[in-house]
C-alpha cells in the first residue's frame, strides 16, 4: 500500500503525525507538497512538488489547482502502467495543453461572476451540489466560502439531496449546482427540478451554451471542454465566486 500525503505548506500538523505513524510501521510514503524542503517533503520516501510559489490566501487557490493537476497526472501515469487504454491516456494528457486557455476564459468573465456573487451574498445559507468527481469540488468550495464569508454553506452530492437536506430548501436557501457537460449531466437536471419544486433558487455552474441554461435562476458559464479540464475551470469559477461574495460583505479575505 502506498500512502500519499497532500499539503500546501508541508507542515500540516495532523498530516505530519499520520506520516510519522505510517513511517514507524514501515509504510511507503509519497508527498504532494508545495513548499520545497518542508517537513512532510523531507520525511516522505518519494514525491512531487507542485511548485505554485508562495500561497498567501488562507483559502488556498493556486496550490489547490496545482495539487489537483498533480493528482490527475499521477493517476494517469499509474493507469497507463496498468489498465487505462493508451488512446484515452494520450487524449486526456494532450487536452491539458489547452487548460491554460480554458482557465483564462473563466477569468475574462470575472465581472459576471462578481455580479452573481454580490446578489447571493445577502443569503445566510447555501448548498453547494455536485455529482461524482464534481462532488469533492462542491465540498472544497463550500468550505472556502465558509472560511472567508462566515456564512453557513453545506455541500452534498446532488444524488443524495432527497434524504433530509431537501427539506431545508426554500426561497431563502439557494443552491449552487456544479453541472458542466459530464456523463451525469441529465441526473443533475433532475436534481435542479427537485429544488425548484420547493421554490429554491439555483445558480447553475454550466458549460457555455448549456441547453438548460434558461431553467436556472442565474448561471456561471465555463468553457465547453472535457470532464477533466472542467474540474479546473469550475474550481477557478468557484474561487472567484467565494472571493467576490466575501468582498461584497466587506470581509478580511486574505488573512
Image (cartoon, helix red, strand yellow):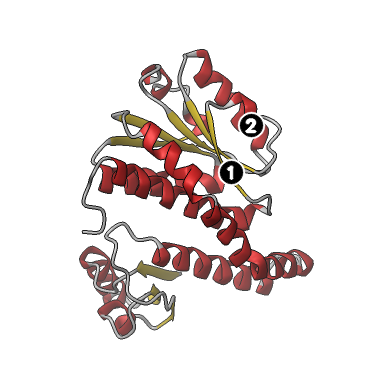
Write the residue at 49% across / 27% down.
202
- Front one among 147 and 105: 105
Write the residue at 45% across / 48% down.
238
Q: Is residue 52 above or below residue 157?
A: below
- Front one among 75 and 64: 64
> Which SS class for mark 2?
helix
Q: Which residue is mark 1?
A: 221
> Which SS class for mark 1?
strand
Q: Position of residue 252 (x, y in %)?
A: 21, 52
- Horizontally, residue 25 falls left or right of residue 160, namely left
Tell me whether the residue at label 1 lies in contact with that at label 2, contact meaning CB atoms closer than 8 angstroms. Answer: yes
Write the residue at 42% across / 65% down.
62
Measured in 3D between alpha carbons, the distance from the residue under mark 1 to the one under mark 2, in whole angstroms, is 9 Å
Q: Which residue is mark 2?
A: 213
Q: Is residue 103 above or below residue 203?
A: below
Q: Position of residue 6 (x, y in %)?
A: 37, 67
Q: Is residue 253 above or below residue 129?
A: below
Residue 152 shows which numbered tag? none
Q: Position of residue 213 (x, y in %)?
A: 63, 31
- Front one among 42 and 117: 117
Q: Earlier in the sequence, mark 1 or mark 2?
A: 2
Name the residue at the right extreme. Answer: 87
Q: Position of residue 231 (x, y in %)?
A: 55, 54
Amino acid at each position: 500500500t502506498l500512502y500519499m500525503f497532500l499539503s500546501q505548506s508541508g507542515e500540516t500538523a495532523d498530516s505530519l503525525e499520520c506520516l510519522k505513524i505510517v513511517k514507524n510501521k514501515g509504510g511507503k510514503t509519497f508527498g504532494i507538497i508545495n513548499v520545497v524542503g518542508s517537513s512532510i517533503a523531507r520525511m516522505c520516501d518519494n514525491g512531487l512538488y507542485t511548485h505554485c510559489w508562495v500561497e498567501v490566501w488562507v483559502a488556498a487557490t493556486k496550490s489547490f489547482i496545482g495539487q489537483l493537476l498533480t493528482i490527475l497526472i499521477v493517476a494517469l501515469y499509474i493507469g497507463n502502467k496498468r489498465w487505462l487504454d493508451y488512446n484515452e491516456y494520450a487524449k486526456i494528457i494532450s487536452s491539458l495543453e489547452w487548460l491554460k486557455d480554458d482557465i483564462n476564459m473563466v477569468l475574462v468573465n470575472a465581472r459576471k461572476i462578481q455580479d452573481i456573487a454580490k446578489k447571493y451574498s445577502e443569503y445566510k445559507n447555501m448548498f453547494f451540489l455536485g455529482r461524482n468527481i464534481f462532488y469533492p469540488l462542491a465540498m472544497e468550495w463550500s468550505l472556502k466560502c465558509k472560511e472567508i464569508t462566515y456564512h453557513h454553506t453545506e455541500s452534498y452530492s446532488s444524488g443524495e439531496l432527497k434524504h433530509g437536506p431537501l427539506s431545508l430548501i426554500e426561497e431563502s436557501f439557494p443552491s449552487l449546482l456544479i453541472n458542466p457537460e459530464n456523463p451525469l449531466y441529465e441526473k443533475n437536471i433532475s436534481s435542479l427540478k427537485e429544488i425548484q419544486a420547493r421554490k429554491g433558487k439555483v445558480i447553475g455552474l454550466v458549460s457555455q451554451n448549456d441547453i438548460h441554461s434558461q431553467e436556472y435562476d442565474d448561471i456561471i458559464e465555463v468553457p465547453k471542454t472535457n470532464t477533466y479540464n472542467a474540474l479546473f475551470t469550475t474550481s477557478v469559477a468557484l474561487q472567484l465566486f467565494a472571493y467576490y461574495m466575501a468582498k461584497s460583505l466587506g470581509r478580511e479575505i486574505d488573512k
